[in-house]
Amino acid sequence: MEKFDTLTAVAAPLLRDNIDTDAIIPSREMKSVSKTGLAAGLFAGWRYTAIGGREPNPDFVLNQPAYAGTRIILGGSNFGCGSSREHAVWALHEYGIRAVIAPSFAPIFFGNCIRNGIVPARLPSDAVAALAAWVEQDPAVHRITVDLEAQRVTTAAGASHRFELDEEPKAMLLEGLDAIDLTLKQRAAIEAFRARDRAARPWIYLDDPRTVST
């Protein structure tokens, strides 16, 4: 998984509450079971002028030249609700999104972000609205910084907002670890426990020669 430390980038305001996974990537756009080939379907219902088409809707924020290279989304409450489809996060990541800042997230979507290298930063709605208003003045210049180590969202105008994130998901994002990799950081402790347990209860280990009948 791609590591995340600090990102300063163009942020696109999409301040709609209850943006669900079908809006993020409609089911008709899920033509792959892999993590690739999904970016074109991101926000397809809003991004294009017709269902199934590819003519850009000029009114949609990601199609506007000022937001070229967007890597941060400013969203509304309950972002990522709806289905549990991980494709929604895959599509965001393939498009280039590395952070979503919103007042709240659907729990499954939040976890999917962590497991795919996207920072889900929860900030109060008034803070998100203030960031969006500042960005909209000059999106290419008014970039937002997400500092994962410090757990802060900042701007060149002096705004600074702390977001909360538990230590385990933070470590996964900082070090680029999936859940298995995170567990394997404890390999020495796991192997030491197994050695002690094997000595104490050899009968539960099928590969222990002391358990083989003759």
Image: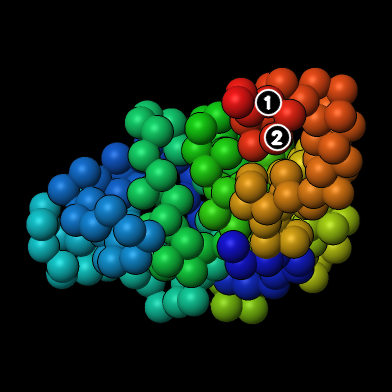
Percent from the top left, x then y, of residue 188? 86, 49
Q: Nearer the viewer, residue 161 or 99?
A: 99
What is the x, y in percent for residue 195?
85, 37
* Secondary structure of the residue carrying numbered label 2: loop
Q: Quadrant of residue 53?
A: bottom left
In the picture shown, does residue 167 fall above or below 50? above
The three-letter code of the residue at mark 2 reads Asp
Residue wearing tag 1:
211
Measuring 45% from the left and 77% from the top, which residue is drawn there? 68
Residue 30 visible (yes or no)? yes
Quarter of the image for the C terminus: give it: top right
Q: Local crowd at mark 1 within 10 Å, few (<14), some, or many (≥20)?
A: few
Q: Are marks 1 and 2 in contact (CB under 8 Å)?
A: yes
Task: Please give the label number shown on residue 208.
Answer: 2
Q: Quadrant of the N terminus?
A: bottom right
Taking the image as shown, residue 73 lies to the left or right of residue 178, namely left
Q: Nearer the viewer, residue 22 or 192?
A: 192
* Three-letter amino acid code of the residue under disc 1: Thr
Q: Residue at x 15, y 69 (%)?
A: 55
Residue placed at 40% from the left, 78% from the top? 65
Residue for point 69% across, 72% down: 8
The x and y percentages for residue 49 are 15, 60
Left or right side of 84 for 158: right
Asked whether residue 164 appears in the rendered view, the answer is no
State the CA–CA distance, disc 1 to disc 2: 6 Å
Q: Which mark is residue 41?
A: none
Badge 1 element = helix
Quarter-of-image position of residue 176: bottom right
The residue nearer to you, when weighing 148 against 205, is 205
Compare residues 37 and 185 and report the one nearer the observer.
185
Residue lying furthest front in this view? 214
